[in-house]
Image (cartoon, rainbow, N blue to C red):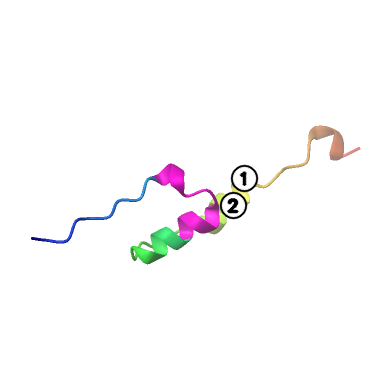
């Protein structure tokens, strides 16, 4: 009998580090992680700029 496939539910990966480790374990490379992180960084509001 073949070995059953182990599935991991995405919601069970509680942190970004957990998700990255899971992807690495599967041999999946996620290009653009730095770009995604850059786009989710807090930005200055209009009142913080050009005063």
Q: Give me the residue at 19% from left, 56% from top.
A: 4
The span picked out in magenta is: 10-20
Residue drawn at point x = 41 percent, y = 45 percent: 10
Q: Determine if residue 32 is in view.
A: no
Q: Is residue 1 left or right of residue 30?
A: left
**Per the image, is 13 magenta?**
yes
Q: Position of residue 9 (x, y in %)?
A: 37, 45
Q: Which residue is mark 1?
A: 40
**Screen quadrant of the N terminus:** bottom left
The secondary structure type at the circle numbered 1 is: helix
Mark-to-mark CA distance, 2 and 1: 5 Å
In this view, the residue in front, 41 or 24, is 24
Secondary structure beneath label 2: helix
Q: Residues within 10 Å of mark 1 (few under 14, many from 20)?
A: few
Residue 6: mark in rendering? none
Camera-nearest residue between 27 and 8: 8
Residue 37: assigned label: 2
Name which quarter of the figure residue 50 lies in: top right
């Amino acid at each position: 009998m073949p070995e059953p496939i182990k599935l991991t539910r995405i919601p069970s990966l509680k942190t970004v580090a957990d998700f990255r480790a899971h992807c690495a374990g599967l041999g999946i490379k996620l290009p653009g992680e730095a770009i995604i992180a850059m786009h989710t960084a807090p930005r200055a509001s209009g009142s913080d700029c050009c005063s």
